[in-house]
Image (spheres, rainbow, N blue to C red):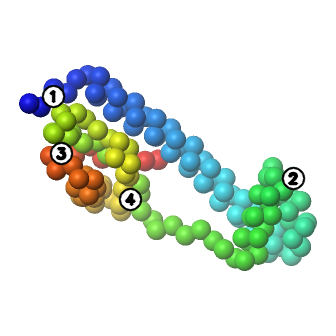
Amino acid sequence: MARVITNRDVQRATFVESLHKSLRKQASQAIANHKKFVVIASTYIEDGLDESEAVELLMIDGLSRESAESFISMAMNKQSDTEDGLIEYSFQFENNDEGSICTSHDINKTISAANDEEAWAKAEEAIDEAGIESARVLSVNRIE
């Protein structure tokens, strides 16, 4: 007998989504700061500063010595971050076996897709890969 989905189940799923959205927002801020310091470090090196001067300037910009040295090392080695241009999505699904609403975070999965339609298809694949046979996708949400 399938369990009836309660308001508490919906509230739990909504809370988990909200929590992960907040964490993703913090992570995106950290990524933005990382990219900012990569650009600053590269600029210092391109301007002809030697390694120790560039490290000191990054420390003035607010980094610890170890972080500043790391960014300067990356700039000197011309390492750059690459992005695949895909958007990250989370999703909610109804698990008919347990009779509950679950999120992608419950099965430790998020998906990357170029658009919403592809995200729906990948969400269904992720559920299948997780071994949940009797489930249907309820929503797919862009993680920002």
Q: Quadrant of residue 7?
A: top left
Tell me what residue is drawn at x 87 percent, y 71 percent.
Answer: 51
Gap between marks 3 and 4 measured at Cα: 20 Å
> Relative to 19, is 122 on the left or the right?
left
In the rendered structure, find residue 3 and report the number of the disc placed on it.
1
Residue 35: give x, y in percent of width and height. 65, 60
Give the secondary structure at mark 3.
Answer: strand
Q: Please determine whether, in this image, residue 89 is positioned above or below residue 39.
A: above
Asked if the residues shown at circle 3 and circle 1 are in contact, with their CB atoms under 8 angstroms apart, the answer is: no
Asked if the residues shown at circle 2 and circle 1 are in contact, with their CB atoms under 8 angstroms apart, the answer is: no
Kind of residue at badge 3: Ala
Give the secondary structure at mark 4.
Answer: strand
Asked if the residues shown at circle 2 and circle 3 are in contact, with their CB atoms under 8 angstroms apart, the answer is: no
Q: Residues within 10 Å of mark 2 (few under 14, many from 20)?
A: few
Tell me what residue is drawn at x 81 percent, y 72 percent.
Answer: 45
Residue marked by disc 3: 135
Nearer-N-terminus badge (4/1): 1
Q: Which of the two marks, 2 or 1, is nearer to us in this view?
A: 1
Nearer-N-terminus badge (2/1): 1
Kind of residue at badge 2: Ile
Gap between marks 3 and 1 measured at Cα: 14 Å
Q: Please determine whether, in this image, residue 80 is positioned above or below residue 135.
A: below
Q: Quadrant of residue 93?
A: top left
Asked if the residues shown at circle 4 and circle 1 are in contact, with their CB atoms under 8 angstroms apart, the answer is: no
Nearer-N-terminus badge (3/1): 1
Residue marked by disc 2: 60
Q: Which of the two marks, 4 or 1, is nearer to us in this view?
A: 1
Residue marked by disc 4: 112
Kind of residue at badge 1: Arg
Gap between marks 4 and 2 measured at Cα: 37 Å
Q: Residues within 10 Å of mark 1 (few under 14, many from 20)?
A: few
Q: Which of the two marks, 3 or 4, is nearer to us in this view?
A: 3
